[in-house]
Amino acid sequence: MTRTLAGLILLLSLLPALAIAQPARIGSKQFTESVILGEIARLAARDAGVEAIHQRELGGTSILWKALQQGDIDAYPEYTGTLTQELLHDVPADADIATLRARLKPLGIGITDSLGFDNTYAIGMREDEAARLGIASISDLRAHPQLRFGFSNEFMDRGDGWPGLRRAYGLPQTQVSGLDHALSYRALASGAVEAIDLYSTDAEIPYYHLLTLRDDRHYFPRYEAVFLYRLSLEQSAPAFVRALQGLAGRIDEHAMRAMNAAVKLDGRRDSAVAADFLGTHVEQGRRGLWQRLRQRSVEHIELVAISLGLALLVAIPLGIVAARRRRLGQLVIALTGVLQTVPSLAMFVFMIPLLGIGTWPAVAALFLYSLLPIVRNTHAGLTGIAPELIESAAALGLPPLVRLRRIELPLATRSILAGIKIAAVINVGTATLAALIGAGGYGQPILTGIRLDSIPLILEGAIPAAVLALLAQAVFELVERALTPRGLRLQARQ
């Protein structure tokens, strides 16, 4: 008993050390500045002797905020305006960092002082177009209701975004579209839209010769860049917290804009740009194409294989039940059909409160998407069997389970395999969105390519995904041929 107690005490005493040994997990949003800041935090932690990993491009604000609250990440870069307008609704828009720190403490979240720059929202137009129309401020937009706006998808729904801006300025425009922020500049340059939302430190503002419209009604609050982190780290990993706090006041607006330009316009790696800023060394360059492709292939195939395997275990029995009991079957098919109508990205986000971020919420979402085609085709295959065959089997005195295993399922094999094939192909494509919640796969280079406006990076993910979908289809066609009884194959040829 004494030894057991001593061992327990020793284990408890080692828990803080074990917690420190775990790498700190830094998240970043799906835009270049956030990724650069995440790399700066990782390298600063490394130089302070703390192992840290950077989980890049995890989507928008809500995903990072939930991941931090649930402990799936330990820190991420954020902006004070986003805190006051989007995340904390009971603090004034002009709340200072001390006020925010007091408000975040009960949530178990800490905040650093300002990193040194304000990256506020703004509305931008091409300089030549603004001059032609005589527009210099946001208020001037009221006189041009025909203008087309292209705002980032997050800005379209944020409390400090388009809905509030429209009310504050009484803007009459109705042609307002949601775009990925990285693509909105190309849309503006091509004339597809006349105004977009900007971040004031965006490198594209001078590159595309854009005019930042004056916020004459002072609608947008200040967006001081900070790091949010879990307060428990102050005890378990104080060196990591000190590394984050040591970045406060070190990055001014000019430096941040220059780093954004180096990555977005000059094509430099964000880790190299972050290392140059800190005056430190960067690790060996990123892996070669085949190494990256091998890793992404393994991640993507795991997502598809696990989710599809789980779906088979559930969907085929559900299809059998649906075929046996008509009313229950209608309910089962209706429910799986409703799951199929949920937008893919929404389904992934819904999984975060339940399973966090990473592989398993992605697997859960893909599993739910796989159910309908397999359930429906199993049901259709079994109910499509000629009644006289079922009656003949019953007349022979075969028990129901034997009839199912020896007669009905073999006859329904082609239909069932067709449903599995459809589910597999759908999963391969949908799994590219899993990168938004940190699950990797072919979606990672696609997201990075969109962010950096790099067609080769987009193709690095898109082409293997298309090839994998074709391979999945071919494999299941071979499986269908192998499992379909010879007599049915000959009948199908005739």
Image (cartoon, grey):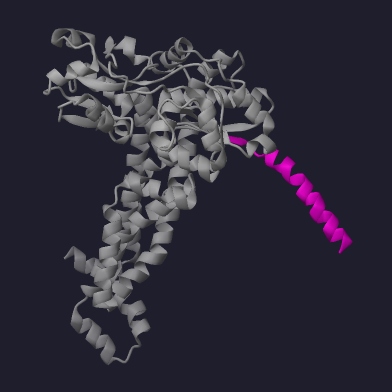
Q: Which residues are magenta?
A: 1-25
The image shows residue 333 at horizontal and vertical percentages of 26, 66
307 relative to 30, above or below? below
> Which of the 4 quarters of the picture holds residue 307?
bottom left
Residue sitting nearer the eye, 228 or 289: 228
- Residue 308 lies in quadrant: bottom left
Residue in the foreground of this view, choosing between 391 and 224: 224
Residue positioned 42% across, 25% down in the render? 94
Residue 289, placed above or below residue 341: above
Q: In which quadrant of the rendered view does residue 45 lie?
A: top right
In the picture, the quarter occupied by the N terminus is bottom right
Q: How many marks?
A: 0
- Res. 287 in view: no
* Residue 160 rendering spot, x and y as whole percentages: 33, 30
Name the residue: 29% across, 63% down. Answer: 335
**Does residue 146 appear in the picture of this structure?**
yes
Dominant SS of magenta comes to: helix
Pick the quarter of the image with the C terminus.
bottom left
Which x, y percent locates residue 125? 23, 15
Residue 238 within the magenta-colored segment of the rendering:
no
In-image side of 127 versus 354 (left or right)? left
